[in-house]
Amino acid sequence: MRNLNLTLVFLIFLVSLFTLTFKLGLIPNGIYVDEGVSGYNAYSILKTGKDEYGKDFPIAFRFFGSYSPPLYVYLTVIPVYLTGLNEFSIRIVSAVAASLMIFVVYLFLKTGGLLKNKIIPFLLLLFIITPWNFFYGRAGYELYLGFFLFSLGVLLCWLSLRMGHLLLLGLIILSIATYASHPQIYSAPLFVLGFLTLFYKKINRRFLILGLFISLLIQIPHIIILNTKAFINKSDLFYLDEILRNTQNFPVPQILSIPVSFIYSFFSRIVTYFSPESLFFFADPDPQRSIPELSVFYNWMVVPFLTGLFIWLKNIKGNFEKLLLLIVIVSVIPPSLTRDPFSTQRALNLLLPFFILICLGLSRIYDFIKFKMFAVIYMVVFGISLILLWRSYFVLLPAERAISWGYGYKQLAEFISKNPETEFVIDQSRLKPSYIELAFFQKTDPRIIQSAVDTKIQQNYYNLNEFSPNYKFANIQTRLIDWKTDGCTNQVLVGDELILSPDQAREHILTEIHTFSDPRGYPIFKLFKTNPDKKCPTGQN
Amino acid sequence: MSSLKNNSKIPSAFAVIFSNFWIYKILDENLLIGILLVVISFLIIVKPKQIYILFTCLLILLFFQFQTTHVKSLTLLDNDEQRVQQERIRSYPPTYVNVFSKTLWFKPEIWIEQNNFIVAISRIERNLFNTLDINQYFFAGFPRNNPSDFQKYIFITLPIFAIGIFELLKKKQYVLLFLIFLIPIITLAFIGYDNQLGPFSLFPFFIIAIFSGFELLIERLKR
């Protein structure tokens, strides 16, 4: 029976791997800048041992000044080496992590003791197609890897209550998770602290001391950059201005107005992460971080979720229930301290406890009906969910979210490559950093990009977080268009419809040479050739 | 709702009913509905077993909710929605299956995008989940900031409300919950709550939940 279960779980893992890698290089149908910068830096590390700024093996990558944890980039070096720099190679690490997550979820469900073994395979299949899992499991940047390592570390800590030696591994993996994605820098230590508080009496002290010691050793690179901007670089996401602005809204003595305002802002965000509207209907307000017409869970999951929530709260004194509570708390605190109303990226850790609650609810529903009936209902609901996912992810997303995912840069990069004699200026006023997309698709030699940046960055790498999207390499310049001078230079100006409007074209005597449109036909980039002879006949250029 | 005796319930019931912003807004804009809400809430707290009277009052309340709400069609599409629908239809790839020598063509774009039943379901879902948004009741819709939202309850009463719901479920008050929560929520899912006063047919539910939470806290404090 045990072997049968393991075989089944392994088969579900293969299904997950297939599903998550299906058309992985084609959908999403562009490269988001965060994917591009991770992939290109992996390429740069592979080719030169340095990142795009020429820094040897960084502890935190200075992506657009964000200092991202490095693990995803270093792991992406392997697929980039094997298959080259492309859309598939930069996303495969996430897809593999998301597939391995099946084993983690399986062990949580099995060892939690809250539901019947018979339905676990059904639930694992559901996990694969859960929109939150599916979406980030196919995104080529660090978030899912961080979530996977955090969940694995938590699982091992939980299992260590029965097999003491696993605590050592759990603590080590949680420590490594802090190098995988930003949220884990906060969630992992908070979890360890909470876990030790809740289960101190049940923990093997020998493995605890050894585990903490090794975890601390793993943290040495972080300790090295502790006093730099690279470590504390997300403070601008905190809503201090909002707290100060709202103080006057509360009829309390002045000394209490700031704490009350903070509590209001903080708890309103926490509540958003539990609101059925956010979890089952609305998506992340950022179009790049959501699937059209789908939230992070399917609508129908609201019923098992609320049922599971009630059962969970009713039995909150149980060990597994306490563990779930701890995961929820440590996962919801970091995103609630940032200004976004509902960030699916920063709150990704909530996927695990919330999915377990849904499973708990489904299990209770299973208790009320016979297995055959459950199987029929499950098939119908699973089928509908699958159709919804296909419609939203494979049909609507490539059309409606093409621009958000950087669609058009591949075509633009090819066009620029075919015209090596022409100078191109890509306007940056309304676009995300274009240099990285073009360098990615043109597979520009990393040494060229490294030589295009300010040399001061290399000397003070972890403290210069100000980012400029202005680059000049090969026949490309990415910067703001200077209308006084650019019209007097023989070149091609690239921008969106608002920057290069028909009025601008008329005023600066520009000739339209090409338009790149999204799959629906809406223009993304307009390319205009300058006419210096007509614009500046006196030879101003 | 049994720990307090009926006599001692009256002041607490008044305190809970009138300790929120919503009731004052309702009383200010529509006195009749306001009085009806006070009476229903009071009745449920003090005489929770008078199911038939309660049910009649709730029906009247739902009638008012329907009368004051600008009800939108569940299937009619405005110009912009029609544009989106057409764009979506064009986004679908040709969908077919080859069975031996025959090709079976499918029309998912018609079955999904032009299906009135699916359009209606998605609008019901939208109404339902808008109504279930906890932030609109306790944080005036903050941080999403929908301009039509307004502060209904003081945010510090949210934990008491949550405890109250939990308590109602634990005590298996299913009939009461069916009347004051499920019936209004189903109605609101179909008609929405596009009106000045919000989804006021849920007002008694919030009051009862807060009252139950409050009662439990008092009981624990007494111990």
Image: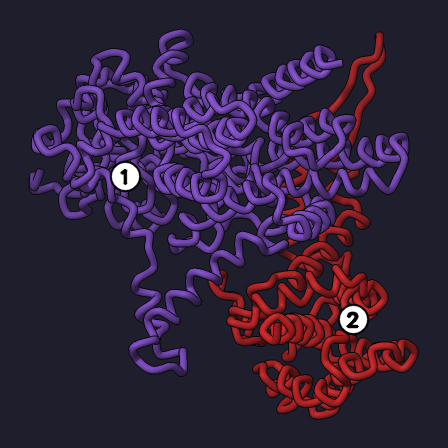
Chain colours: A purple, B red
Q: Is residue B119 visible?
A: yes
- Residue A406 x, y percent position in the rendering: 42, 34
Query: Circle 1 is placed at which residue position?
Result: A66
- Residue A317 x, y percent position in the rendering: 61, 48
In percent of the image, x 45 and y 32: which residue is there? Answer: A150
Residue most toward the right?
Answer: B52
In percent of the image, x 28 and y 50: which residue is there? Answer: A235
Residue B191 or B138: which is nearer the viewer?
Answer: B138
Label 1 – label 2 distance at C-alpha: 50 Å
Q: Is residue A529 visible?
A: no
SS at mark 1 in the image:
loop
- Residue A468 x, y percent position in the rendering: 20, 40
Q: Quadrant of the C terminus of chain B?
A: bottom right
Residue A216 or B40: which is nearer the viewer?
Answer: A216
In percent of the image, x 19 and y 42: which residue is there? Answer: A229
Q: Is residue B46 above or below residue A216?
A: below
Q: Is residue A16 above or below residue B136?
A: above
Query: Circle 2 is placed at which residue position?
Result: B180
Q: Chain of mark 1?
A: A
- Residue A51 x, y percent position in the rendering: 22, 22
SS at mark 2 in the image:
helix
* A396 displayed left or right of B65: left
Q: Please, what is the three-letter code of the amino acid marked with disc 2?
A: Ile
Q: Please, what is the three-letter code of the amino acid marked with disc 1?
A: Ser
In percent of the image, x 67 and y 46: which residue is there? Answer: B85
* A480 displayed left or right of B78: left
Q: Chain of mark 2?
A: B
- Disc 1 or disc 2, which is closer to the eye? 2
